Image (cartoon, rainbow, N blue to C red):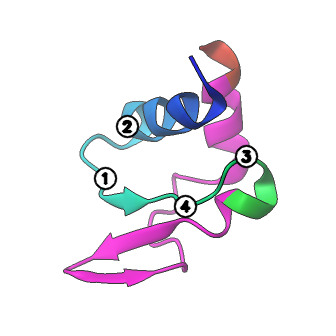
């Protein structure tokens, strides 16, 4: 499983059915902050999900 796969799995575990676009090659805190979140049909890099912090997602990724 690649780090990108782990990222998507971690996010879906923490908040199922969360639409997003990840256009990076590596997963780091910096690239996590570049995720494009789909908010009612518009994309933003401002994370609208308070439970999806880098710390929470990274911890979930480390379990995989």
Q: Nearer the viewer, mark 2 or mark 3?
A: 3
Mark 2–mark 3 contact, CB under 8 Å? Answer: no
Label 3 vs 1, first from the N-terminus:
1
Expressed as whole percent of the image width and height from the top left, the position of residue 56 reads 64, 40
Residue 26 is marked as: 3
Instruction: Report how far apart the C-alphas of labels 2 and 1 lie in the structure.
Output: 7 Å
Q: Residue at x 37, y 37 (%)?
A: 12
> From this viewpoint, which residue is outermost toward the front?
25
Label 2 vs 1, first from the N-terminus:
2
Label 4 vs 2, first from the N-terminus:
2
Q: Which residue has dot 1 on it?
A: 18
As displayed, is residue 18 above or below residue 23? above
Expressed as whole percent of the image width and height from the top left, the position of residue 22 reads 51, 58
Image side of residue 64 versus residue 40, left or right: right
Q: Nearer the viewer, mark 4 or mark 2?
A: 4
Mark 3 crowdedness (10 Å alpha carbons): few <14, some 14-19, many ≥20: few
Stretch of the chain drawn in magenta: 32-61
Q: Which residue has dot 4 on it?
A: 23
Picture quarter with the N terminus:
top right
Q: Which residue has dot 2 on it?
A: 12
Mark 2–mark 1 contact, CB under 8 Å? Answer: yes
Q: Nearer the viewer, mark 3 or mark 1?
A: 3
């Amino acid at each position: 499983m690649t780090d990108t796969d782990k990222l998507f799995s971690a996010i879906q575990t923490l908040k199922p059915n969360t639409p997003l676009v990840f256009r990076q090659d590596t997963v780091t805190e910096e690239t996590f902050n570049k995720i494009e979140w789909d908010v009612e049909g518009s994309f933003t890099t401002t994370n609208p999900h308070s439970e999806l912090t880098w710390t929470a997602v990274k911890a979930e990724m480390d379990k995989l």
